[in-house]
Image (cartoon, coloured by chain):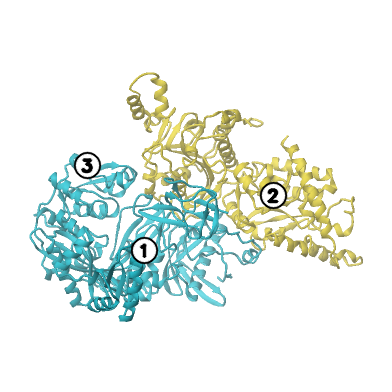
């Protein structure tokens, strides 16, 4: 269903482009195609030269004027110098209708640049759509090129990065183009959970401009105002949650992508990468001893805890502007990549709701798929109550997060910093969901609900509510009820949290856990 | 290794910690820092065990001064009681004290100024004496009275002295009677210009003429001769009559390029009083001291003695006991005039402790118990030189410092350095809130000579790590290395004179800039290399050397590149430098980009800047006190739109152009953050 809903977009958007593009495009002089009797060698050189030019100098300049880089510039910037190895430079589209068969409408390589290269020495496959050729629209040949590198990436086990800048389907090709999309979608699905797929939206990306439905991470830079409102970077990173990070411009996005890439394993067969750490693994963090306010109603910033604990205060947050009541992102502990999930008491008291559950679940599943240990910081007063949430299916969506944590077999370490109330306690990587190490800080309160609500139910209509509340707090608003039952493994001094996590990760590096055989699980979608 | 450096450099691929660099330019080689002074740099740490003072003292203050007092109490074996507001419940002074009592909620009027609650705390804990610190209740005679009524000792002067010195007019009269130099002047009706000239001549030029009723510097005229006096008379008398309906004029000695120099006095209850030399506090902004030193470069022994003796005369005249400070204005000819007397421990007392070796808090406690002074005037030395910088959480680029708030995400005092004293009441993880003074700490350095103390201060500032709030270390460092300051040619106008357009940050010389770029490039390369070898772990512990070529010039950078450390000691072209990398609020801002990225960067669109003339944003975090406009109003240029208060400071925000108010996004009583939208104009 979701797929079909994209198709009208493809057509509408592309109509605009198909009108504008050919008119201004094809009047360049002295092009290679006018010469017919060249040697093969010369023809190869000329074709290569033409491929490097994409849609021509004029279009390149127009692209630059819009503050955007060309497809090739982007690839160069993303990959290590001299590491790009291009494939299918000679592929051309095969459309014979509407004058497309004319030589002047053929561009070697068509509207996408594909190949492989390295980021910090690590293999990656890349495709970069070329807006200067037919607005980057997706032809059958274009799709075929993308499919080829995706297949190769799957064969050798290396990530695929798509740099998207495309008006959508190539209308002149009709169903051929749609088929192309489907071919790519299939590969997206097959590759999901096998190799990381990252897509960077660097211009229009109407319709199904590919891995969008299976992006692991993607970024949007879009300066067109109306497009911005329809589905620009801001919409997709703050409202729809389709995109995971937005950046100022192409260069920011590409260089940040390089940073991000360093966190990822090449495939699900690889362990999480380890980088040399300059931050000692047994560093104590005394500032954490006071970070949780004494009043349990007062907020604090979970990011402060995360920054203080991880290596070199480096935290690559994913979806920082969407469902801010949960924080997810990548960091390193003693050099090893970890995924971090934390409730954010600063936003909606850190309550779980539909959006934050889905955001968290997707992240947890990504980490589990790619062998990245998960560290969870818990301060959750429960699920957000209200009809909007109930009608929206909070039970189904909340279950996604529970499902994700429960099925994950990577090392799971949980720290309860303060509240762990009700069902949300169960969900947040609790011991009961096969948490490997579950810690509580002295400020932790594991309970069915807050003292006030609990007392109102237990002592309904009785007097001395205040007294009863104090008794309840005394009994349950501390880590002991959970600790005596073994639901937390230890109550630790906050200052030692980093040290403990690093030690645990060391031990858990050899963790082996297998879920029962099944065709696939049936996560509540 | 050689790299390409491009003017606009960016650290995109470098970890975020490297994105902005703070660069410390320092040339003095470390070898010269040998220690000549044997004396303990701070104050005596030994107290005489035979003198029994109090068993338990309550400190009616917070922050660094509360910690400071507790330290001495511990040394003297006295139990301590801290008071605190609810938000301060885990503050450093609370942890340091033996007992702590919460005296109310965050606003000072509900807690630290809440006399009832503090009196209760005294009763509950059985404290025998109260040290008030500075500010809050330290010069509150009502508080002193209530303590006396309950038989609790007030560690400070008695009520009479507080009252006498608390009133500006009365204190001047007392000073005059005690033969202390006061600013000569005349306040009354002046009938003719010639009469004005006569008065001016008696006072001695230059003189200042203004209407008595006009406040502050309003309508102030300065006359250097008879002619200017006549003109000033005409102008001021007209203004006095027309604007104020009060034709009294004030003609007063005008003090050009005044210096603010104060004398520390110490007196006991037996009529003994000492002067503990001077402190020069001329570097001020908005009448708040920023950098202080002792002794002053300006005073000769004769002037010092004269000032000291007059200060003691004043102290004796009001039967002063305890530590106090007599403030003077000193003109360019070393004439000095009494300004006021502070009947408390001053913020800047540590520099006096450094050069005299006395523990002023200890002396105050002794005196409060009724002991006689242990010293005579001949015992009071000037040993070496001490400098104090007040490190504030504030943005020095906005009128030399507007308050900033936040959590100290990283905090490291330069205590590893010799002869450095840091008086602070915060630690890593502390919050700087809008409720209290934004001072982070007092950084004090000490040396045998001024040059030594200054050099050490430079080191200390460079080694001071503060993250999470904007701080004024860039400004402090500029001041203490400014040639005018170094030569001692300063006055209270130093800041506005040296930075007429406001403080813009350190301006790098070509060499220093090159070295900064080279260091940034080396860090960038170190981070890149580390990322590239992630799969084959090899930890290189040895220090390595890099050679960077910038516009043909070679820069050698040598040092262990620890990318996790907030402090990066590097040797650049043979000179030791301390670098700090920071992600925000930092100048200069350095970006490192590869050659390709730098070339392509030229295509990137400039970020459209906001039209600041029609949008009013809060320049600092604080509380909205008043909003003077509503949507639809037309405001004139310069008209007040709203008032924001933070840390005892009210800031009036005005319109920069005439316009109609489009929308108002704040209301009185609301708390706003820095950069929050307040009012939009059309």
Quarter of the image where the N terminus of chain B is located = bottom right
Look at the picture and state if B514 lies above or below A418: below
Q: How many numbered marks, from 0 up?
A: 3
Answer with the quarter of the image where residue A482 lies: top left
Which residue bears the numbered disc 1? Answer: B243
Residue A281 in picture, x, y percent from top left: 43, 50
Mark 1 neighbour density, 10 Å: few (under 14) some (14–19) many (20 or more): some
Q: Which residue is drawn at 30% across and 44% down?
A: B110
Mark 3 neighbour density, 10 Å: few (under 14) some (14–19) many (20 or more): many
Between A290 and B609, the residue placed more toward the observer is: B609
Quick one: SS at disc 3? helix
Residue A226's tag is 2
Residue A70 in picture, x, y percent from top left: 71, 59
- Chain containing the residue with disc 2: A
Residue A60's tag is none
> Does residue A86 appear left or right of residue B6 in this picture?
right
Which residue bears the numbered disc 3? Answer: B121
Look at the picture and state if B227 lies above or below A422: below
Outermost residue toward the top in this view: A461
Between A271 and B236, the residue placed more toward the observer is: B236
> Does residue B413 appear left or right of residue B184 in this picture?
right
Between B476 and A354, the residue placed more toward the observer is: B476
- Chain containing the residue with disc 1: B
Colour representing chain A: yellow
Kindly report the distance in space between the C-alpha atoms of the residues bearing marks 1 and 3: 51 Å
Q: Give the mark toward the camera: 1 or 3.
A: 1
User: Is residue B493 visible in this depiction of the protein?
Assistant: no
Quick one: SS at disc 2? helix
Who comes first in sequence, dot 1 or dot 3? 3
- Chain containing the residue with disc 3: B
């Amino acid at each position: 269903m979701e797929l079909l809903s994209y198709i009208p977009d493809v057509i509408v958007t592309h109509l605009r482009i198909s009108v504008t593009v050919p008119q201004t495009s094809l009047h360049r002089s002295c092009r290679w195609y006018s010469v017919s009797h060249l040697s093969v060698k010369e023809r190869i050189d000329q074709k290569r030269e033409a491929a490097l030019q994409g849609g021509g100098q004029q279009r390149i300049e127009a692209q630059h004027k819009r503050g955007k880089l060309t497809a090739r510039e982007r690839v160069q910037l993303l990959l290590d110098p001299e590491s790009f190895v291009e494939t299918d430079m000679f592929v051309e589209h095969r459309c014979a209708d509407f004058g497309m068969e004319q030589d002047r409408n053929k561009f070697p390589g068509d509207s996408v640049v594909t190949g492989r290269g390295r980021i910090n020495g690590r293999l990656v496959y890349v495709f970069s759509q070329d807006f200067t050729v037919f607005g980057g629209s997706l032809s059958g040949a274009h799709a075929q090129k993308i499919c080829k590198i995706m297949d190769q990436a799957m064969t050798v086990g290396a990530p695929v990065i798509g740099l998207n800048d495309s008006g959508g389907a190539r209308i002149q090709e009709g169903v051929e183009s749609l088929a192309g999309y489907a071919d790519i979608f299939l590969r997206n699905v097959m590759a999901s959970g096998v190799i990381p797929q990252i897509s960077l939206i660097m211009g229009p990306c109407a319709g199904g401009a590919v891995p969008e439905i299976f992006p692991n991470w993607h970024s949007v830079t879009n300066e067109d105002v109306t497009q911005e409102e329809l589905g620009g970077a801001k919409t997709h990173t703050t409202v729809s949650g389709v995109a995971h990070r937005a950046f100022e411009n192409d260069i920011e996005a590409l260089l940040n992508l390089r940073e991000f890439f360093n966190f990822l394993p090449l495939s699900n067969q690889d362990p999480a990468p380890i980088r040399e750490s300059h931050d000692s693994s047994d560093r104590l963090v005394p500032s954490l001893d006071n970070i949780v306010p004494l009043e349990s109603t007062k907020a604090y910033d979970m990011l402060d805890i995360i920054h203080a604990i991880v290596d070199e205060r480096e935290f690559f947050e994913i979806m920082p502007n969407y469902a801010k009541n949960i924080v997810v992102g990548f960091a390193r502990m003693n050099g090893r990549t970890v995924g971090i999930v934390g409730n954010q008491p600063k936003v909606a008291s850190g309550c779980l709701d539909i959006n934050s559950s889905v955001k968290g679940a997707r992240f947890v599943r990504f980490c589990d798929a790619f062998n990245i240990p998960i560290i969870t910081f818990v301060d959750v007063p429960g699920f957000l109550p209200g009809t909007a949430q109930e009608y929206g299916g909070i039970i189904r969506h909340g279950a996604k997060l529970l499902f994700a944590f429960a099925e994950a077999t990577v090392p799971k370490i949980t720290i309860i910093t303060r509240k762990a109330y009700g069902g949300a306690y169960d969900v947040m990587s609790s011991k009961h969901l096969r948490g490997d190490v579950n810690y509580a800080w002295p400020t932790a309160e594991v309970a069915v609900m807050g003292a006030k609500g609990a007392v109102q139910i237990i002592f309904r209509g009785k007097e001395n509510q205040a007294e009863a509340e104090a008794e309840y707090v005394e009994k349950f608003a501390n880590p002991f009820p959970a600790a005596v039952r073994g639901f937390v493994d230890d109550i630790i001094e906050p200052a030692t949290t980093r040290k403990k996590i690093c030690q645990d990760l060391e031990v858990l590096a050899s963790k082996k856990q297998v879920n029962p055989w099944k065709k696939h699980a049936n996560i509540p979608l | 290794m050689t790299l390409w450096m491009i003017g606009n450099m960016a650290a995109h691929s470098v970890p975020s910690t490297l994105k902005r660099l703070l660069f410390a330019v320092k040339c003095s080689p470390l070898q010269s820092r040998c220690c000549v002074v044997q004396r303990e740099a701070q104050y005596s740490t030994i107290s005489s065990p035979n003198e029994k003072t109090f068993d338990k003292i309550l400190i009616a203050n917070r922050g660094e001064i509360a910690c400071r007092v507790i330290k001495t109490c511990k040394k003297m074996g006295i139990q301590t009681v801290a008071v605190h507001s609810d938000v301060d419940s885990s503050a450093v002074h609370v942890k340091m004290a033996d007992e702590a009592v919460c005296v109310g909620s965050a606003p000072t009027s509900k807690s630290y100024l809440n006399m009832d609650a503090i009196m209760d705390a005294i009763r509950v804990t059985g404290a025998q004496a109260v040290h008030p610190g500075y500010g809050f209740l330290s010069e509150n005679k009502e508080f002193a009275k209530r303590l006396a009524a309950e038989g609790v000792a007030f560690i400070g002067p008695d009520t009479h002295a507080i009252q006498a010195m608390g009133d500006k007019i009365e204190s001047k009269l007392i000073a005059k009677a005690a033969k202390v130099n006061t600013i000569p002047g005349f306040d009354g009706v002046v009938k003719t210009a010639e009469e004005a000239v006569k008065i001016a001549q008696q006072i001695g030029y230059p003189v200042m003429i203004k209407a008595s009723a006009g406040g502050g510097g309003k309508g102030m005229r300065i006359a250097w001769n008879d002619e200017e006096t006549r003109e000033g008379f005409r102008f001021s008398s007209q203004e006095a009559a027309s604007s104020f309906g009060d034709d009294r004029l004030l003609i007063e000695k005008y003090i050009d390029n005044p210096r603010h120099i104060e004398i520390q006095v110490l007196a006991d209850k037996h009529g003994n009083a000492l002067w503990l030399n001077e402190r020069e506090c001329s570097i001020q902004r908005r009448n708040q001291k920023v950098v202080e030193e002792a002794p002053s470069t300006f005073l000769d022994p004769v002037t010092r003695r004269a000032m000291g003796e007059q200060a003691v005369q004043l102290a004796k005249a009001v039967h002063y006991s305890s530590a106090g400070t007599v403030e003077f204005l000193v003109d360019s000819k070393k004439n000095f005039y009494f300004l006021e007397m502070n009947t408390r421990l001053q913020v800047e007392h540590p520099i006096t402790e450094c050069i005299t070796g006395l523990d002023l808090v200890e002396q105050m406690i002794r005196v409060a118990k009724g002991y006689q002074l242990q010293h005579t005037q001949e015992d009071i030395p000037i040993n070496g030189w001490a400098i104090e910088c007040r490190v504030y959480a504030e943005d020095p680029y906005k009128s030399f410092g507007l308050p900033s708030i936040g959590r100290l995400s990283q905090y490291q005092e330069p205590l590893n350095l010799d002869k450095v004293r840091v008086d602070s009441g915060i630690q890593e993880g502390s919050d700087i809130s809008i409720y209290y003074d934004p001072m982070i700490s007092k950084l004090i350095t000490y040396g045998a000579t001024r040059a030594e103390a200054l050099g050490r201060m430079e080191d200390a500032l460079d080694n001071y790590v503060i993250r999470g709030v904007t701080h004024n270390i860039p400004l402090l460092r500029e001041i203490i290395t400014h040639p005018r300051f170094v030569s001692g040619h300063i006055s209270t106008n130093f800041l506005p004179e040296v930075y007429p357009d406001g403080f813009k940050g350190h301006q790098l010389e070509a060499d220093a800039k090159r070295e900064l770029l080279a260091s940034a490039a080396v860090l960038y390369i170190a981070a890149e290399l580390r990322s590239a070898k992630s799969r084959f772990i090899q930890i290189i512990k040895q220090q390595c050397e890099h050679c960077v070529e910038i516009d043909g010039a070679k820069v050698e950078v040598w040092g262990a590149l620890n990318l996790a450390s907030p402090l990066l000691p590097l040797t650049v072209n043979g000179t030791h430098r301390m670098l700090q990398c920071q992600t925000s609020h930092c100048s200069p801002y350095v970006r490192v980009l590869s050659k390709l990225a730098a070339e392509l960067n030229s295509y990137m669109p400039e970020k459209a800047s906001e039209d600041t003339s029609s949008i009013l944003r809060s320049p600092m975090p604080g509380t909205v006190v008043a909003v003077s406009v509503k949507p639809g109003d037309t405001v004139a240029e310069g008209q007040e739109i709203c008032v924001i208060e933070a840390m005892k400071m009210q800031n009036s925000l005005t319109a920069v152009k005439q316009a109609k108010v489009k929308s108002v996004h704040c209301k009185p009583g609301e708390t706003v953050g820095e950069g929050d939208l307040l009012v939009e104009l059309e």
